[in-house]
Amino acid sequence: MPQAERPVAWTPLLATADWMSPDVRDRLASALDVAAELADAPTRLAAWADRQDLARVGADTTGWREIALAGHGIEVAAPFLDSEVIRACLAVPADQRGTPGRYKPLLGEAFAHTGVLPPFVLARVTKGGFNALSYAGLREHASVLRDLLGPSSRLAAAGLVTEAPVAAMLQRAALGQPTAQGALHLAVAAEVWLRQLETAPACWEVDSHVATV
């Protein structure tokens, strides 16, 4: 079901919520109800959403940096996540940080006439798309993904995914039809992580030293 057609929710739900077993969905709904009761309601939803987005982007960037450095010797820089940049941006009210008729107004104000960014960066009003590459990859590796998230899936054993909706989604992807790629990415990452846990050595910390068995 498209997100726009869903009831208003305290937190947006990814397509992975549709892939869960009914029992797990019920438990997730109960957990969200409890979390909503315990959390202080934000004065404005935008402030809460900004914190969530920053936490997510920061965590993702940390992972990408480690992968790029360890695997390719490349240092990933994220200057827009610098604490001073974030503080400066958050000092501007959320409803003024973006406008329908202007693309990234804060970036334009900060770097106009500085020569730091090329003019085409400040003038562009779109972002690059990689959908064609994504769908090509999904088509090429559809069988691998079906096996990964199929009956032998660790997520399936926990009721976090069920085979039929995942298989239907992969079939749509193979045909180039709209697919919940973000949800699929998270499901694959979680499945691979769970499988790696089974072969990882057990570790514990003793007097600040890590021992393995």
Image: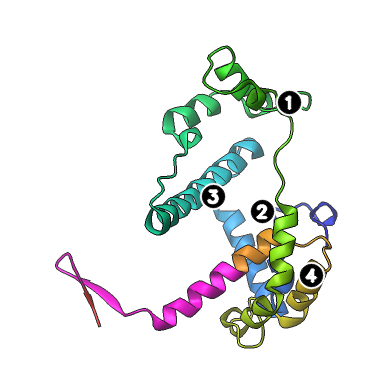
* Sequence-wise first label, 3 or 1: 3
Magenta segment boundaries in residue numbering: 188-210
Whether pointer 4 and pointer 2 mark residues with C-beta atoms closer than 8 Å, the reply is: no
State how far apart marks 3 and 1 are (Cα).
23 Å
Please say whether residue 65 is one of the residues in the magenta stretch.
Answer: no
Residue at point 62% right, 61% down? 32
> Quick one: label 4, few (<14), some, or many (20+) residues within 10 Å?
some
Q: Is residue 176 left or right of residue 115?
A: right
Q: Which residue is mark 1?
A: 99
Q: Position of residue 127 (x, y in %)?
A: 70, 38
Which residue corresponds to mark 4? Answer: 174
**Tag 2 residue:** 11
> What is the three-letter code of the residue carrying label 1?
Thr
Give the CA separation, mark 4 to mark 1: 37 Å
**Looking at the image, which is closer to me, 68 or 179?**
68
Residue denoted by label 3: 56
Image marks 4 and 1: residues in contact by CB distance under 8 Å: no
Spatial separation of the CA atoms under disc 3 and disc 4: 29 Å
Callout 2 secondary element: loop
Q: Amino acid at mark 4?
A: Ala
